[in-house]
Structures are given as C-alpha cells and as structure tokens.
Image (cartoon, helix red, strand yellow):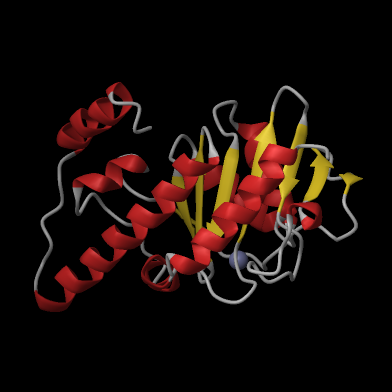
Amino acid sequence: MLLEEERKSIVQFGRALLTAGLTTGTGGNLSIYNRAEGLVAIKPSGVAYFEMTPEDVVVIDLGGHIVDGKLQPSSETQFHLGLYRFRANINAVVHTHQVYATTMACLNWEIPAVHYLVGLSGNKVPLAAYATYGSRELSENLLQAIGNYNACLLANHGLVTVGANIAAAFAVAEEIELVSRLYYQAKCIGSPVILSDEEMEKVIHKFQASSTL
Ligand SMILES: [Zn+2]
C-alpha cells in the first residue's frame, strides 16, 4: 500500500484527536507529507475517525490530484497543501475545532504568551482572518497569518497546527488547548500576566535544544 506508514499514522492520530477531546464527530482533519515521495496522506472527507481504516486515507500529490484511494480528500485539502508548499519544515498538519482555542477564534483574539507552553507555537498564537471553510481565501489568510508560527487560529472556525512530524503537530494542538483554557479561566477571574517576548525567546530556544520543536 502506498504511504502505508503515513496512512496508519493518520488513523492512529485521528482517533487520538477524538479521545483527547480535540474534535467531535467527523470534524477536523490531518495530513502527513512524505517529502521524498512528494505525496501527502490526508484524512478522507466525512468519515468517522473510529471507522476509518488506512485504506480509506487518501494519497494525493501537491497539486491535489488523487494518487491512491477511493474516497474524496478532506474539504480543507487546500490549506494543507498550501502549508507544505509554504514552509520546508512542515511535514504534518492538524486541524481541529477544539473548544477552548476555538472560543478565542470566535472572539477573533490571538492567544498571547499567557503560559510558557505558548512557545510551542512561538511568542503567541496568531489569528487568520475569517473566510468560508474549504475556500482558497481561507488558505491564503492562513498562510499570511501563520508565518513561522506552529499554530494559528482560524477566525470563527478553529485551530491549525503544524510540525516536523505528526506527533509534534498533535502535541502543539493538545498544549494549545490547555493554554487556551488557562487563558479563558484566568480572564474569568482577573487579568492574566503575559510573558515578555524576551522570556519567550528563551523558552523557544530551550524547546529547540531539547527537540521539543
Ligand atoms: Zn474546520
């Protein structure tokens, strides 16, 4: 089977998105880019995570053409491919509607450095302007906003995280959910203290040195 390992990982981490509470139903999507092969394994559209098999995972090229698979690729294929073309250090993309991060996205807020784990994204989590799901405009807004960050909110929609591999992209999504919840809770009872850019630079260097990033 073409991209067998990647397809198995899509099934494994897709299920983990549900069990970690980062998405519901068939929502969200994820993909892995095999740069050597020039091929992407991506979640099929509208398939429940616990019913999805490796064969269901769609293999496409960077132009979005189906190379292997019987199902249609995710409705957000456009921004997955856009990210792989945009940055050479991105080999996996995770997109969720995780509740606390999406709460920030619905307020059209960025997430500041309220906790050092924001460093998994950078010195903040930026926000991409709203556009209809699945549209080219959404992909363009995301690429414009994400820059060198590893996470980006989609206004009134959700979160996108990226990484050198699927485990890294998944971990960013999970930790940004924690951070979003902390920010929400801290805002409920007071004024959260935001870490300085200088401190966040130190944190990011430590993450890089320990291969957390
Ligand atoms: Zn979505």
Residue at 60% across / 34% down in the picture?
91
146 or 73: nearer the viewer: 73
Residue 67 image-quadrant placement: top right
- Asked if residue 96 is positioned above or below residue 139 in the image, the reply reads below
Question: Where's residue 170, x and y in %?
Answer: 47, 49
Is residue 110 in view? no
Identify the image quadrant of the C terminus: top left
Tell me if 8 is positioned left or right of 57 in this view. Answer: left
70 or 190: nearer the viewer: 70
Identify the image quadrant of the N terminus: top right
Tell me if 46 is positioned left or right of 189 in this view. Answer: right
Question: Where's residue 108, x and y in %?
Answer: 42, 67
Residue at 29% across / 41% down in the picture?
119
213 or 180: nearer the viewer: 213
Is residue 3 in view? yes
Question: Where's residue 49, x and y in %?
Answer: 64, 67
Q: Quadrant of ligand 1?
A: bottom right
Question: Where's residue 128, x and y in %?
Answer: 51, 55
Residue 4 image-quadrant placement: top right
Residue 81 image-quadrant placement: top right
Residue at 59% across / 30% down in the picture?
87
Q: How many badges with numbers are in the image?
A: 0
Tell me if 163 is positioned left or right of 188 in this view. Answer: right
Tell me if 191 is positioned left or right of 96 in this view. Answer: left
Residue at 78% across / 34% down in the picture?
39
